[in-house]
Amino acid sequence: MSAPTEVLHRFAPPWIEVGRLYRRICFLRSEGLSAEARILQETEFVEAAARAKGLFSSGPEADSLLGELMAEEEERVAEAVAFAEVLVPILARRLPVPPPAKAAPAAAPAPRARARGGPAETPTIADFIDDMLAQDGLAPR
């Protein structure tokens, strides 16, 4: 196949889809998500590759282009990952650190004293409800 013909096929939408899917497969593998990569490769990628290969009259030419495209995408992803590993820490150091959010202090209800003047006891749910009603001015009389 002539170089111009190969270039025309390579930029046809089916081949662009094949490259996009294979790039995704490579990224999944680089992240250790081999099962997801395998599923994608065995489903969507196989279908897209078959559509792309259908543009060729010769099977060997299509297989050759597919092999080249896969090798290029593997290299492209490896370079992108390496670049990100270097660039992300540099960018993270340059980003301003936002000030910590000021949390409102939680007002814990004071333990209630026993009616008979005994030691403080742990409040119950009913005590919390009574406190809420009292704050709203709806305390029982």
Image (tube, grey):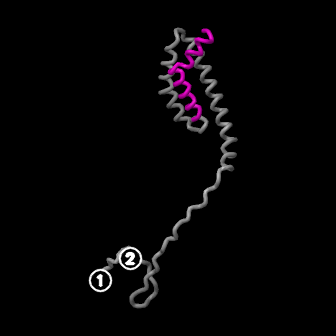
Total count of labels: 2
Q: Name the one closer to the observer, 56 or 101.
A: 101
At horizontal 58% and vertical 34% (from top left) the residue drawn is 27
Q: Are marks 1 and 2 in contact (CB under 8 Å)?
A: no
At horizontal 53% and vertical 66% (from top left) the residue drawn is 103
Write down the residue under mark 1: 141
**Secondary structure category for the residue under label 2:** helix
Q: Counting residues from the N terminus, which is met first, the one under dot 1 or under dot 2?
A: 2
CA gap, disc 1 and disc 2: 14 Å
At horizontal 52% and vertical 16% (from top left) the residue drawn is 53
Which part of the image, by quadrant, shows the N terminus?
top right
Residue 134: x and y in percent read: 36, 78
**Secondary structure category for the residue under label 1:** loop
Residue 90: x and y in percent read: 69, 46
Which part of the image, by quadrant, shows the C terminus?
bottom left
Q: Residue 20: say if magenta.
A: yes
Write down the residue under mark 2: 135
Extent of the magenta region: 1-27
Q: Residue 69: say if magenta.
A: no
Q: Name the one closer to the observer, 132 or 70.
A: 132
